[in-house]
Image: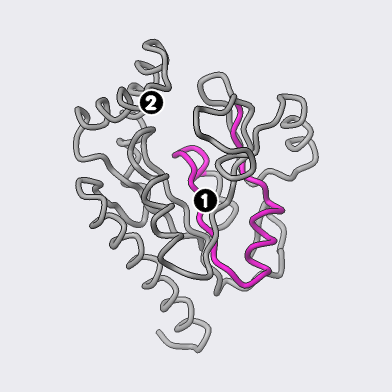
Amino acid sequence: MEINGQNTGISGERLVLVVSSPSGGGKTTIVSRVLCEIGRIARSVSYTTRPPRKGEVDKEDYYFISGEAFRKRIDSGDLLEWEELFGHYYGTSKEQVEKVLMGGDDIILSIDVNGARSVREKVPDCVSVFIMPPSRETLAKRLLSRNTEEREDLAKRLAESEKEISSSEEYDYLIVNDDLDKAVVELKTIIETERKNRRGKKKGYL
């Protein structure tokens, strides 16, 4: 497998799963459930310069770091993907991904549409899943219920969500999150199917 244009020596048998959804689309809840129900898979913990929201834990939900520390990671080439969103930086550590894969586990990257595009370019055999909210109205209600956004930020997130939803056709799989339990089962099925596909390729099966 190649990451950032460099051969890491990691076998393509391991699964890099990219999961995206609009803010409030439910990917964090779905991924958390899947991690509890499937073994040998980890979630990449992203770096961000935004302040923690209520209930978020450093090094579990995100690595919360300063702008200066984030720029150092960019300059060192450590970030597999990164971007600025709503005035804050977000990024995925290449070293963290490589460590999980080298340890023999699969990994889930919960990132947005732009980050997913970057990862697909650098890790061509990754698998991508887009989690779609059942409706725009439901998405707006979920964002409002979080009570984490100012009204101005909420409007920006909803506008960005429209762009992200329009990009869902770029993904390998689409899950409509109109039923949480069903969405969890669908993501688990995708992981299990892709694992079987990779084992089959390793054995030389079509």
Q: On the image, which quarter does residue 172 sit in?
A: bottom left
Which residue was labeled with disc 2? 160
Going from N to C along the chain, the mark reached first, 2 or 1, is: 1
Which residue was labeled with disc 1? 109
**Dot 1, how many residues are within 10 Å of its Cα: few (below 14), some (14-19), or many (20+)?**
many
- Total labels: the figure holds 2
Horizontal arrangement in the rendering, residue 26 relative to residue 13 (left or right)? left
Give the extent of the magenta segment.
89-117
State the residue at coordinates (55%, 41%).
61
Residue 161 x, y percent position in the rendering: 34, 29
State the residue at coordinates (34%, 42%).
26
Residue 104 x, y percent position in the rendering: 62, 72
Let me know if residue 92 is in the magenta part. yes
Instruction: State whether residue 40 is above or below residue 48.
Output: below
Disc assigned to residue 158: none
Q: Residue furthest front?
A: 55
Locate the C terminus by quadrant: bottom left
**Dot 2, how many residues are within 10 Å of its Cα: few (below 14), some (14-19), or many (20+)?**
some
Horizontal arrangement in the rendering, residue 72 relative to residue 50 (left or right)? right
| Amino acid type at mark 2 | Glu
Let me know if residue 61 is in the magenta part. no
